[in-house]
Image: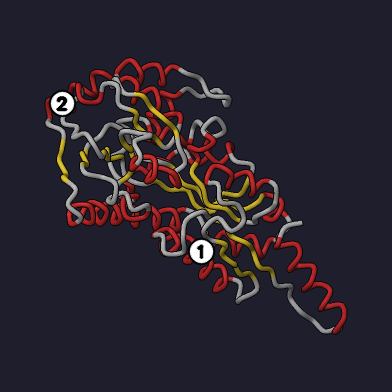
Amino acid sequence: MTFYKIIRLIGIAATMVIAVPSVNAAEFSLSYFMGPKHPMNRAVFTPFAEKLSEASGGKLTVKQYPGGALNSAPPKQYSILIKGIADIAFGLSGYTGQLFPITNTVSVPGVCSDAVKCTESLWRVFSLVEKEYDAKILALWSNDPPVLITKDKKVTSLDDLKGMKIRVASKQQVPFIEALGASAVSQPVSVINQNLANGTIDGIAIGASGIRSFKLHEPANYIVTDFPGSGTAFFLLMNRKVFEDLSDEEKKWVGEASGKWLSENGGKVYKKAAVGGLKLAKSAGVEISQFSDQEILRMNAAMVQAINSYRKQTFPSGITGGEVVDLMKGE
């Protein structure tokens, strides 16, 4: 039984006992694996909770469970939502990429150039994306394209990438990294600081917003920007049955508190956090550089075959990767 149901049943019981008119109150549990100071709490979780309480006159509220209180494993957030352990959950679609191929197309190199534009790309295909989730989408947004963070090796060229073990956020990014001559490893973000520090991985491809959130400036010595890639998709979802059990009026309140405006908040704050992350790294003594135009052209050429292969694949819904890429780019 979900937290929502328990609270609602208590409200119903109380109404029956005191025998006076009353509107049921409901408190939703919201799970996320980061700490409460993470930028997405300020950008998405708290604004959703505040707007929902305002729209419902305090009848619908949210209780946060940060730091993995309901489940600490980042890849398990969608699972605990589906099982009803959490009423609402935050997560990365890339951790279960096989379930969300359309969503994760936002990570294909060349699709979008910053967190705001990548969020726009996701919403261009929202009617396709929402069919991938067995849940109510409250928000769907992206961070910035990745930078490459390394500890022992300064990367300045395509040749430098050969043989490096680089962490990526989703399996869909693997063929593009491998096309550059590197080995791609998909790992939860919760372990990447330690793995870079101890040499388990040689580099981390991640949006610069993650530098502060996961203290990546501490093990890092070098960061190169303009690394090939696009965004990484993030979601805030409500358990489908919890949503469907709401009255029409309650669903309207949830709708007012969620959707595109909330998603845009996430994109805007991630874009700002990326700038702040690079600034923090620089102040900590990390050397920050950019790939030359010539090296960017070389990397783009190296990925052509991988991108073409992605475009040719057909997703379970029948649409091709190329069609989704073009829709996301507004073409």
Q: Position of residue 34 (x, y in %)?
A: 47, 56
- The residue positioned 70% from the left and 55% from the top of the image is 242
Q: Which residue is mark 1?
A: 48
Please state which amino acid type lies under the numbered disc 1. Phe
Res 248 → quadrant: bottom right
Q: Quadrant of the C terminus?
A: top left
Q: Position of residue 173 (x, y in %)?
A: 39, 29
- The residue positioned 12% from the left and 31% from the top of the image is 292
Q: Which residue is mark 2?
A: 295
Please state if 10 lies on the left or on the right of 35 as rendered: right
- Give the colour scheme shown: secondary structure
Q: Quadrant of the N terminus?
A: bottom right
Determine if residue 224 is in view: yes
Q: Position of residue 300 (x, y in %)?
A: 24, 23
* Dot 2 and dot 1 residues touching (CB under 8 Å): no
Disc 1: CA contacts within 10 A as few (<14), some (14-19) or many (>=20): many
